[in-house]
Amino acid sequence: MRFLLRRLLFGLPTLLGITLLTFALSRLAPGGPLSDLLDPEQGRAVTKEQLAATEKLLGFDRPLHEQYGAWLSSALRFDFGRSLTSDRRPVAEKIAAAAAVSLELQGAAVVLLYGLGIPLGVFAAARAGTRRERCLAALLFVLQAMPTVVIGALLLILFARGPFAWLPLAGLETPGAEPAAPLARALDHARHLVLPVACLVLSGISGIALYARAGVLEALRQPWIRAARARGLPEWRVRYVHALKSGILPLVALLGGLLPWLVGGSVAVETLFSLPGLGRLTIDSIAARDYPTVMALTLLVAAATWLGFLLADLLHAALRRGEVDA
């Protein structure tokens, strides 16, 4: 309990500092969400008096510390206002719609990352020094060196034409398709997610597999592993139960840092594959200087990252305690 309270006391000022820095940078950057209203080429030219009245209505004429105080007061009540874009939708509504897409994408990616990365790492550790292990390690290092954007572009090129052109390249549903049965719609939706999920998995599986390899390889060198083999335990049980139980601790610690990577990767993936998720919403909101949406997204990502690290620390401590008790 003391550990949890200490992390909470350190985490809350960090969240506050992140929102304060983001608020200051967004307000001090040149231009603004209303700057296009003065552009006659866009057919939106208004007088400076009208612009000043709009800024006063939105509170942009107040000092920065008062604007931040008003935003923080509303955020504590989970009221993030309305978007400054033309649709004027509530920010919470826009984020909820985008979060559903991102959670689906990232949830599938995390399951596959651990479901495929851990067995690959155990396979590599069990065959350390062999030709197959060196070839696998070389492939993993190549994938680790490739940016997510490059992997996504290669997938688009590979599946854009030819014998592999059977997967959709963008969006979440086939455009112009007639309403179908729920199962058909679900299958179509799943087909649209194959390439984006594959892009995230290919760009992140190296870290999971290499961490698993290092942890299991260290565990396999311990005396108690030799004792387990001497008792006649099957090799698969030695590797995937005893060695993996000890070698999984680095993977638990990695779980906390996986969320920021997924958020960053989702920006590229959702842009490449035209998915209406949080990453795409972030890019669009920054480009439009949609301050309320940018601030809400910043707070959401910072809080989720902090909670991810907190959860990883708690799991790590629980596993450590289990090892000591055992």
Image (tube, grey):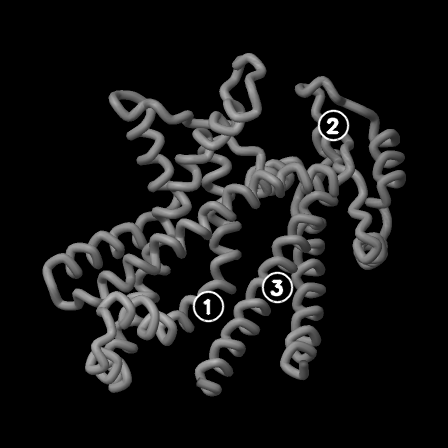
Percent position of residue 278, x then y: 59, 42
Specify which label sits upstream in the sequence, 2 or 1: 2
Whether residue 320 is visible, yes or no, is yes
Q: Is residue 293 above or below residue 22?
A: above
- Amino acid marked by disc 3: Leu
Q: Which mark is residue 252?
A: 1
Instruction: Give the CA distance from mark 2 to mark 1.
Output: 43 Å
Q: Which is more foreground, mark 1 or mark 3?
A: 1
Q: Residue at x 33, y 66 (%)?
A: 212
Q: Residues within 10 Å of mark 1 (few under 14, many from 20)?
A: some
- Quadrant containing the C terminus in the rendered view: bottom left
Query: Residue 56: which quarter of the image?
Result: top right
Q: Residues within 10 Å of mark 3 (few under 14, many from 20)?
A: some
Q: Which is more foreground, mark 2 or mark 1?
A: 1
Query: In this figure, which residue is indicated by the disc labeled 3?
Result: 307
Please indicate whether residue 55 sits to the left or right of residue 8 in the image.
right
Q: Residues within 10 Å of mark 2 (few under 14, many from 20)?
A: few
Whether residue 215 is visible, yes or no, is no
- Amino acid marked by disc 2: Ser
Please indicate whether residue 226 sits to the left or right of residue 69 in the image.
left
Q: Residue at x 61, y 40 (%)?
A: 100
Q: Residue at x 29, y 30 (%)?
A: 158
- Amino acid marked by disc 1: Val
Kindly state the secondary structure of the residue where label 1 is placed.
helix
Q: In front here: 291 or 136?
A: 136
Query: In this figure, which residue is indicated by the disc labeled 2?
Result: 86
- Quadrant containing the N terminus in the rendered view: bottom right
